[in-house]
Amino acid sequence: MTRRKFSREFKVEAVRLVTDRGVAVAQAARDFDIAESVLRR
């Protein structure tokens, strides 16, 4: 299995979803199809 690479824009949007819009980290992780621990980092 190869490691996935995420663009800067993808990372910024994922973080904005949580910080600016108040979406739960777990929900945002599901929406972006990534592990919750990845988003928390």
Image (tube, grey):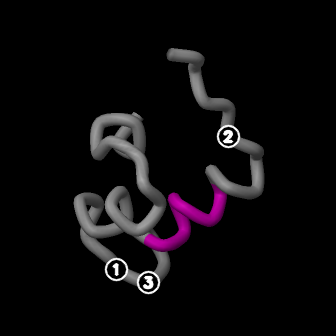
Q: Name the residue under label 1.
A: 22
Element marked by disc 1: loop
Q: Is residue 16 magenta-colored?
A: yes
Return the x and y of residue 3 as percentages of the image width and height: 57, 20
Q: Which of marks 2 and 3 is nearer the N terminus?
A: 2
Q: Image quadrant of residue 10?
A: bottom right
Return the x and y of residue 36 as percentages of the image width and height: 29, 45
Between the C-alphas of marks 1 and 3, the distance is 4 Å
Residue 25 located left or right of residue 14 = left
Q: Label 1 sits on what residue type? A: Gly
For this orientation, the residue located farthest to the bottom is 21
Tell me the chief SS of the magenta region: helix
* Chain part drawn in magenta: 12-17
Q: Label 3 sits on what residue type? A: Arg
Return the x and y of residue 16 as percentages of the image width and height: 54, 69
Residue at the image point whose x is 58% and y is 17% from the top = 2
Residue at the image point whose x is 76% and y is 44% from the top = 7
User: Disc 1 or disc 2, which is closer to the eye?
Assistant: 2
Between the C-alphas of marks 2 and 3, the distance is 21 Å
Q: Name the residue under label 3.
A: 21
For this orientation, the residue located farthest to the top is 1
Q: Mark 2 points at which residue?
A: 6
Q: Do the residues labelled 1 and 3 touch (CB within 8 Å)?
A: yes
Q: Is residue 11 magenta-colored?
A: no
Picture mark count: 3
Q: Label 2 sits on what residue type? A: Phe
For this orientation, the residue located farthest to the front is 1
Dot 1: few (<14), some (14–19), or many (≥20) neighbours within 10 Å? Answer: few
The correct choice, above or below, for 11 with respect to 35 in the image is below
The correct choice, above or below, for 1 with respect to 10 in the image is above
